[in-house]
Image (cartoon, grey):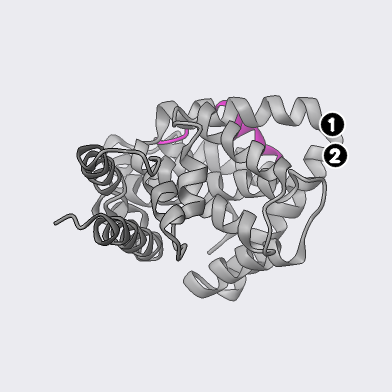
Amino acid sequence: MALGKWIGGFLGLLHGGPLGMLAGFVLGSLFDSYSSRISQFTPEERQAYEPQGERNGFLFSLMVLSAHIIHADRRIMHSEMEYVRRFLRTNFSATAETEGEDILLRLFEQKKRMGQAQWDAQIRDVCRQLSIAMPQEQRLQLVAFLCEIAKADGRVANEEREALRQVALHMGLAATVPDQMMGLGGTTLDDAYRALGISSNATDDEVRRAYKRMALENHPDRVASLGDDVRRAAEKKFKEINEAKERIYRARGMK
């Protein structure tokens, strides 16, 4: 997995824009030469490359937003970095792990150069670009990954929670989505209600509607084009949604 392939998604899914600017910083002249080469592709070549481009666009977007969440509390925690490294190492290769970490470190460096205010504005614009270019189900999966990173050190700082809410909002999702993702995998009834985005005072019909909406929006088939590793993560999330529903149904005596 050569470093240049991280930006394959700019072929169609994420063509230029604020995310392309960050890719340009990370990849330097390699980005320029790669962009020049793919601009000469025939329509048939572009169509053949599109599935890989969609996946790589998703992965590069994940790296950019991971850098934002990891450093939201102005600290770079080993546990959060290790979560990303382990994800890359397990699902790709040791080379991908090294290159992914290099991307994160370069993004941290860019944030330092830009300053907090300019970086936040850049991330806001990146999220808005994703809200247009990326389907909702992929954006939901991005937020799910980011929540797992934020939880990796055993606590989620207020700054991280706010950063997650802002990312969700600017990507065209509800501000409550990160909190719902945080509730997944919990063991209490409160966690279950939180995961479905409803209160314990919700009616049975509201519970059913909330579950159906979550199940539809987060079905693993909707992210199958992004690769087996992303699909497996989506399957885990889908299983946890069903577990939350079953916990609520049992408590209420619902069928």
Residue at 33% x, 49% y is 51
Residue range of the region highlighted in magenta in the rendering? 13-25
Tell me residue 196's x, y (percent): 36, 46
Residue 214: x and y in percent read 30, 45
Which quadrant is the C terminus positioned in?
bottom left
**Residue linked to disc 1:** 115
Q: Which mark is residue 112?
A: 2
- Between 192 and 25, the residue placed more toward the observer is 192
Q: For this view, does 34 lie left or right of residue 253? A: right
Q: Circle 2: is it few (<14), some (14-19), or many (20+) Cα within 10 Å?
A: few
**Residue 54, quarter of picture:** top left
Q: Amino acid at mark 2?
A: Lys
Q: Could one spot residue 53 in this view of the protein?
A: no
- Against 16, is 91 above or below? below
Residue at the extreme left: 255
- The residue nearer to you, when weighing 131 against 19, is 131
Camera sees residue 219:
yes
Say if mark 2 contacts mark 1, CB within 8 Å. Answer: yes
Q: Please, is residue 147 above or below residue 239 in the view? A: above
Local SS, label 2: helix
